[in-house]
Image (cartoon, rainbow, N blue to C red):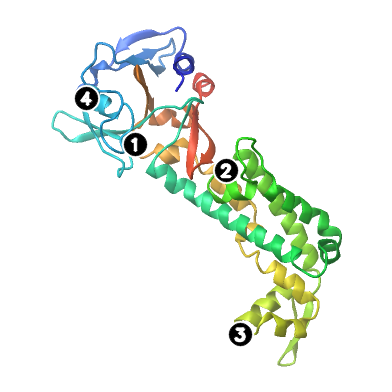
Amino acid sequence: MNRILFQNLVKELLLEQTTTIDNQSAVAGRNTKSIQVDKSGKAKNMWNTYKDMIDDIPYESTMQGVGPGEQRLAKILGGKVLGPSSSYDLALLGPDGKIVETWEVKEPDEQGQIRPGTEGVKIANKVSSLMSSVVSEMKEFINAVSSKEQTPAEFLGSSVTLYEEVKNFLEAVPSKRSTKDNAELLTSGEIQKSTLKGLSQQIINIQKIVQDLQKNVLQIDVNGRTFQVSPVKMLKISRLLGLDDDSTKEKLGDATEAAIALSSLSNPVFENPQILSDLWNEINAESVFGNTNGVILVDNEGFTFIPKTKLKSRLIFTRISQGRPRFAVSAQAANQE
């Protein structure tokens, strides 16, 4: 990360008027950590420099799958590095050698953001998988409409403008730095909040198209009783009975074309778009790092602690990249606590 940017972030995280006191921890080797306390008695973590602490452990890791600063912090704080297969990076040990605290160790990038490991992947995967499914079904619907003998305008009538909006959104290339369109980005685990907002609007558009195409109701007789069934439900019943779509078309007529096109939209999100937003809102620093004591931010000159109680306010979820959530270090949020 850019050193000046990192230093500025750290300075903003600290209160301007503070008095430094020593914090003698029960954890072996932790007497290097200091705490700042403002006039109200609220504790704030200071920036700790490696100078005079240790000089024989390199900042860059010598172990595969272990991040920068982890080995050095293990030596300074009295702990051990857990490695890439663990859900946290660093275990701090008490005098008896037992684990007393666990921490994630992260080096912010040039944008002041961090990307978690295995726990982050698990949580982000729920959103990524759902979005990939939704986008795939939307594309299948678009292809079904465009492949018909009728033009989209003839087939959809007044809903064709909504269809064009959905199609244009999926095919739009949002970044000059990439040739990937929205559909490719969403299905590959690259999700911005703005893209989520755009996708949510297109799901609403799909809902309106579905309502318009399903306005035809079929009446069927079963044992002398008359039932009203939508073409889509009738198509599902026909397929369950082993009938091909051509045979079904003979029975249902023109309504079959709409039913076939709509049959690709089976994800529950098309009935309840709120599912997507709810899953997105579940991603936060506490849900990702909450099974640890917090996060230690590092660079090649020092480190600072973000305890578990401050995770939500200091690490703000911004997007999913490469299938993992990204969190921005928020100095402003910390100062507003």
Q: Residue 38: give x, y in percent of width and height.
A: 42, 11
The span from disc 3 to disc 1 (Cα, nearest Å) is 53 Å
Marks 3 and 1 in Cβ contact (< 8 Å): no
Nearest to viewer (mark 3 / mark 1): 3
Q: Residue at x 80, y 70 (%)?
A: 149
Q: Nearer the viewer, residue 163 or 124?
A: 163
Which residue is labeled 2 in the image?
Answer: 191
Helix, strand or loop under label 3: loop
Q: Can residue 271 be seen by looking at this rendering?
A: no
Query: Label 1 vs label 2: CA separation?
Result: 26 Å
Q: Given the image, on which type of amino acid does mark 3 rest?
A: Gly
Q: Is residue 110 visible?
A: yes
Q: Mark 3 highlights which residue?
A: 242
**Labels 1, 4: front one:** 4
Q: Dot 1, crowdedness within 10 Å: few (<14), some or many (≥20)?
A: some
How far apart are labels 4 and 2 at the CA level?
Answer: 38 Å
The amino acid type of the residue labelled 2 equals Ile
